Amino acid sequence: MKLSSVVIQDNTWYRSGIMSSTEKTVSFRTVAEKIEALDALAAAQDRPRSYLINEAITNYIELHAYQDALVRKGMDEMKKGRVVSHEDVVKRLRRTRRAS
C-alpha cells in the first residue's frame, strides 16, 4: 500500500508519504536564473519541475551512453588496425572539396 499526499507550491510538487524503492532524492545547487527558466518551462508545459529534470537527466544519459559506445567502437577498430592516417583523410576530403 502506498500512502502519500501531494502539495503544489510555486510550481514544485511536494509529496509526503512512502517513496518507492526505485526513487531517490537528489539535491544540488545551481544559479537562480536556471531554476527560474526551468520553472517557466514547467509552467508552460503544465508539468512539475521534477518531470523536466528527470527528462533532462534521461536525455543526458542516453546521449553520453551513445557517444561512449561510439568511442569504444572506434577504439576496438583501432586495436584491429582499421585506421586511416590523417594525411589520407585530408587527401580524400580535398578530392571531394570538403577541405581547404
Image (cartoon, helix red, strand yellow):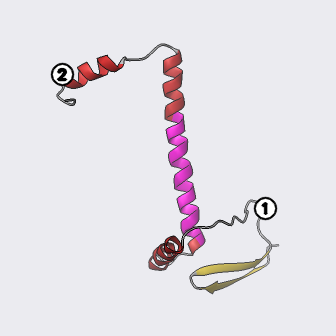
Do the residues bearing badges 1 and 2 touch, measured as CB atoms within 8 Å?
no
Question: Which circle's residue, 1 or 2, is located before the other in the chain?
Answer: 1
Q: Give the camera-side residue of 76 and 31.
A: 31
Q: Residues within 10 Å of mark 1 (few under 14, many from 20)?
A: few
At horizontal 42% and vertical 17% (from top left) the residue drawn is 83
Check disc 1 and report the residue beneath it: 21
Q: Quadrant of the C terminus?
A: top left
Q: Residues within 10 Å of mark 2 (few under 14, many from 20)?
A: few
Q: Give the camera-side residue of 90 and 96.
A: 90
At horizontal 25% and vertical 21% (from top left) the residue drawn is 92
Q: Give the camera-side residue of 98 and 33.
A: 33
Q: At numbered mark 2, what does the secondary structure look like: helix, strand or loop?
A: helix
Please give the label number shown on residue 7: none
Please give the label number shown on residue 95: 2
- Would you say the magenta stretch is mainly helix, strand or loop? helix
Q: Position of residue 4 (x, y in %)?
A: 76, 79
At horizontal 53% and vertical 48% (from top left) the residue drawn is 62
Marks 1 and 2 sit apart, C-alpha to C-alpha, by 58 Å
Q: Give the camera-side residue of 28 and 3.
A: 28
94, above or below 52, in the image: above
Magenta span has 62? yes
Q: Position of residue 15 (x, y in %)?
A: 71, 78
Q: Quadrant of the N terminus?
A: bottom right
Q: Amino acid at mark 1?
A: Ser
Q: Position of residue 23 (x, y in %)?
A: 72, 63
At horizontal 73% and vertical 63% (from top left) the residue drawn is 24
Magenta span has 9? no
Q: Amino acid at mark 2?
A: Arg
Q: Which residues are magenta?
A: 50-69
Q: Farthest residue toward the top?
A: 81
Q: Position of residue 10 (x, y in %)?
A: 58, 85
